[in-house]
Amino acid sequence: CLACLNPLGRLYACIHCVYIGCWRAGHIQAHLVQRDHIFAVDFERCLVHCRLCNDFIYSHEIDKAYASESRRIHDMLMQRARYVDWRPSEEEAGLIRARTRIQACGGLRGLRNMGNTCFMSVILQSFIHNPLLRTYFLSDRHPRHECRRENCLSCELDRLFSEFFSGRKEPYNPGNFLQVIWRSSAELAGYAQQDAHEFFISTLNQLHASLEGSTMDACRCVVHTTFAGELQSDVTCLACDNVTTVVDPMMDISLDLNTAPRAQGRSAKGITYICVCACRFTQAEKLDATEYTCGKCGNNSQSATKQMSIRRLPPVLSFQFKRFEHSQNASKIESHIRFPEVLDMTQFTSRARGRSASKSPPVSSPACQYRLYAVVCHQGKLDTGHYTAYARCRDQWFYFDDTMITLADRVQVLASKAYMCFYTQARLDYTQRINSDEKTA
């Protein structure tokens, strides 16, 4: 860095002049503002930063120039020798077999940011490290070479898994995946910053639609067998105690983070606990007389209570924390969420709520035990922020920032400001369930 002379920081070169500055200390940003320059390029990742957009932009021309120059320098440094075909003898082949170790293809690979596409990168990383999706696509359950559908998102996800587990280490360009998303979801088209949760739900819907045999009723596609559960809503008339029950499908749980009193689980430092948010989600709320008319007594002058509970838990449980308030003045809630690595969902199920009504303590079961495997974080403001992710791979945590992957530990993960959390059941069944009538949670 020409300002602080630090050679080890994240260095950027100004494209307009001969200036090199570091990002962490803000020297390259200060240079761009002072000289009224616009673009700077990251030395290590070859990403272009635009001062006017305050974000990274994708340039196909720079990618081509970088690849061409890398090959040229590589050819200059390599000592050329005439290629001679070599075939090992029986003795050499035996030594090779005895001393060869199979390299694990662990699925650790970065994703290129093609201009405000970090929202897509973090969700794709959560898919890659989802054990049920990984098993489905790597076992060739949707062979893309045999699929005849156009703009098939399942084919692109199959390609993504193949690339990530091919053993290659260079960052992957998910351009084809993005194009299929754009063609299917007009609201996500363009280079504007999108919401990661909206992208997650839209992608699940498109995956469901692209899978053969998918239906709206009791669907057995990989999307529903992985993410789908059931929410139970019980409305109780306070006049005659009649209970009306409605069961709806759910793909994830969105938890409210609105300011709550300290007695309800929010500390003076703005720390909220995921279990407290889930309790608020499943606690009874009063309905006004105008919102409900009892089907039994017909009394609409009395109020009623409505209570949510989880009737059936999915193998993969996804939480979204409502950090963004889209009111007249859009804002972001910066509260810190405390979430555990191991989560017991017993108290939030319909079965446990029935036991609590009979004053019998709920009994935990293995199906209600969940283990954290991925976290999506959002830094910055509502429309100019940046998404990053943590994911667990082979019992080791990693931090994903587009193309960059670094080691992390559980303390760092649990201290992060989460926007989405992904849990898997502690005991997963990878076999295809034959009976579609599953027991309630």
Image: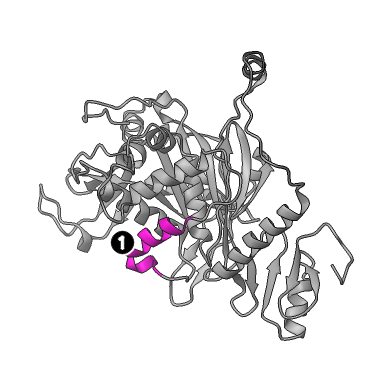
> Does residue 427 appear left or right of residue 225 in this picture?
right
**Which residue corresponds to mark 1?**
184
Name which quarter of the figure residue 95 lies in: top right
**x and y, in percent, of residue 118 in the image:** 53, 60
Characterize the magenta stretch by its predominant secondary structure.
helix
**x and y, in percent, of residue 215 in the image:** 19, 44
Q: How crowded is mark 1: few (under 14 residues within 10 Å), some or many (20 or more)?
A: some
Type of amino acid under label 1: Ser
Figure quadrant of the N terminus: bottom right
Figure quadrant of the C terminus: top left
Give the magenta-colored segment's residue range. Answer: 174-189
Q: Which residue is drawn at the image coordinates 63% and 42% (left, top)?
A: 398
Name which quarter of the figure residue 140 lies in: top left
Name which quarter of the figure residue 22 lies in: bottom right
Task: Please tell me whether residue 269 belongs to the stretch shown in magenta.
Answer: no
> Does residue 16 appear left or right of residue 294 in this picture?
right
**x and y, in percent, of residue 286 in the image:** 31, 54
Q: Nearer the viewer, residue 413 or 25?
A: 25
